[in-house]
Amino acid sequence: MNGVSFLLAHLSDAHIGPIPRPNLAELLGKRATGYVNWLRKRAAQHDMSRLGRLVDDLLAQRPDHVAMTGDIVNIGLAAELALARDWLNRLGGPQDVSFSPGNHDAYVPQSLSVLTQGFAPWTSSDEGESGFPYLRRREGVALIGLSSGVPTAPFVASGRLGPDQCARLAALLERTEAEGLARVVMLHHPPHRGGARALRGLDDAGAFEEVIARRGAELVLHGHNHTQSLHRLAGPRGAVPVVGVASASARAETHRPGAAYHLFSISRAGTEVRVKGRARGFDEASGEVVDLGALDL
């Protein structure tokens, strides 16, 4: 990768709608409150036309790879996930797009099998192995996808990795560092303590922080909070940027900030990995997708 930049696009929280009409059996439990929340609030916050225009702009930038970090749907219905799979195909084929599930994708236990099977092409390792974390090597970059999406009780939107994922993540970070790859970790929830409000954060954020402290990474990407954010975690050779992105479908008039995505240029100069980031989103006056400026990584 010396002297050559790898362009990675990152978007999250598409919340594709409208929700296909569920039957009564599908509305048992948490889905009932989620569906009411969609009808009363969330449907007005997310605009599929804006999402479409944002994706058009993203594809026009010709990224080498796209990271989509979850909450692609709303209440985890099989019909929702089928529509979302078609939408993910629009972003690109499994070789060019990586997906990390969020809490809305894994909304209830019944969502998990549909999610696992339907999205396997976008969540599998190069060697064809299934499960999380997965590893994809692309032009000097290691893309490591985690799943923090787990079913939770009503009104709870927290996530969890679990000790197995954390242990496997540590091993992958060590192995890919030895291979000389620039390591990008992707997940839905902000992976640091205090990264989200109560009942919305990553339950084992401390365990993730310990992995990064021991093994490091060059970049960590997440969604979930529907806002642009930058945090830094301590790594063995310096701070590791943890970057959150706004929802890809948010209407600015009801859900600030408005829809946006990020572009990261990853390159190597000798042994040093350089990461530069920019945000693109809507200029609300013109309605056009424009450059929103550099990310201070």
Image (tube, rainbow, N blue to C red):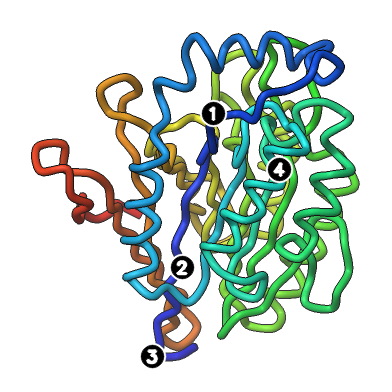
Q: Secondary structure at mark 2?
A: strand
Sequence-wise, the earlier of marks 4 and 3 is 3
Label ID, residue 81: 4
Q: Quadrant of the C terminus?
A: bottom left
Residue at the spot 40% in from the left edge and 88% down from the top edge:
4
> From the viewer's perspective, is the residue at label 3 or at label 2 nearer?
2
Sequence-wise, the earlier of marks 1 and 4 is 4
- The percent coordinates of residue 210 (x first, y second) are 71, 44
**Residue at image mark 3:** 3
Mark pair 3, 2: CA separation: 16 Å
Sequence-wise, the earlier of marks 3 and 2 is 3
* Amino acid bearing label 3: Gly
Quadrant of the image occupied by residue 250: top left
- The percent coordinates of residue 142 (x first, y second) are 64, 72
- The percent coordinates of residue 82 (x first, y second) are 71, 47
**Residue at image mark 1:** 195
